[in-house]
Image: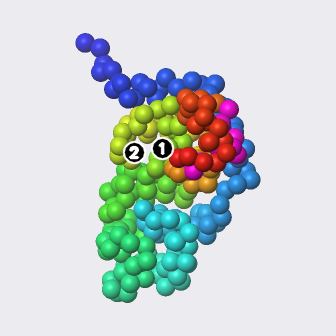
């Protein structure tokens, strides 16, 4: 009996056109050299600062996180400070970000790292996944940004770009979609994957938006499957900055 075949979803991702992937990488990398957003957690390689940022960014707009992130690091500058923090004060600081359980999980994470890893942030995706409140995206974001590991990420922004440009059909819950995770890994370059991840996140937030995508200013429009499949009237609206 031969080895098990890949699921149809994974096959769909593995059949992506290599030339189109190469063009996609080039276009987005060029865009990224001039357009990446500037956030404080992108100005450091400190693993503590980055793991804090990734917790705060979960289901929260980056612009909202900035002032809370700065105040957080001033008050809790080390894992030890965070582990010993008054939970009510910590929760109060994070109230504007929502997710009432965020503070408790973040403090529990700090205590586990101190107790089990000697205060050193784990640099393994698997170890990070064992910490409270850390899923696949967060673990990979930490690995790529703090430890320069070549691990692709997938969030709603990245999923939207991949679905539109390559004509993929992901599942309703993007974070668990095998076809999109497989595509994200195949499409990612071999080097500077951390920067590549940021480029995709920013491109999805700034250009390939969920509503009113800026197709007229999009460097991918010439080969975008989404654009090519639109009726002529809809395509004109999209190019003028309207519609979805």
Q: Is residue 228 visible?
A: yes
Left or right: where does residue 155 sit relative to residue 130? Answer: right
Foreground of the two, 59 or 130: 59
| Residue 12 coordinates in the image, percent (x, y) | 43, 26
State the image quarter where residue 45 is shown: bottom right
Q: Secondary structure at mark 1?
A: helix
Q: Quadrant of residue 55?
A: bottom left
* SS under mark 2: helix
Q: Name the foreground residue: 55 vs 169.
A: 169
Q: Which residue is mark 2?
A: 174
> 9 and 41: which one is in front?
9
The answer to which quarter of the image holds residue 231 is: top right
For the point 66% across and 64% down, the residue is 38
Q: Residue 49 appears at what percent x and percent y?
A: 52, 70
Q: Residue at x 57, y 24 (%)?
A: 17
Does residue 238 lie above or below 83 as drawn? above
Residue 13 against residue 25 in the figure, above or below: above
């Amino acid at each position: 009996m031969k080895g098990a075949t890949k699921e149809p979803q994974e096959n769909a991702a593995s059949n992506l056109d290599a030339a189109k992937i190469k063009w996609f990488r080039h276009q987005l990398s060029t865009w990224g050299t001039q357009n990446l957003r500037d956030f404080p957690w992108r100005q450091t390689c400190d693993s503590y600062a980055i793991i804090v940022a990734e917790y705060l960014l979960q289901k929260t707009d980056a612009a909202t996180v900035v002032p809370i992130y700065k105040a957080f690091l001033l008050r809790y500058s080390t894992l030890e400070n965070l582990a010993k923090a008054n939970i009510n004060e910590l929760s109060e600081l994070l109230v504007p970000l929502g997710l009432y359980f965020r503070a408790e999980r973040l403090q529990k994470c700090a205590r586990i790292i101190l107790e089990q890893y000697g205060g050193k942030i784990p640099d393994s995706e698997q170890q990070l996944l064992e910490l409270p409140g850390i899923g696949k995206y967060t673990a990979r974001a930490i690995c790529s940004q703090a430890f320069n590991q070549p691990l692709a990420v997938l969030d709603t922004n990245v999923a939207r770009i991949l679905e539109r440009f390559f004509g993929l059909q992901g599942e309703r819950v993007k974070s668990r979609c095998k076809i999109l995770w497989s595509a994200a890994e195949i499409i990612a370059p071999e080097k500077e994957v951390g920067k590549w991840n940021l480029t995709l996140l920013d491109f999805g937030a700034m250009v390939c938006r969920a509503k009113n995508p800026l197709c007229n200013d999009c460097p991918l429009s010439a080969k975008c499957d989404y654009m090519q499949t639109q009726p002529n009237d809809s395509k004109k609206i999209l190019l003028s900055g309207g519609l979805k």
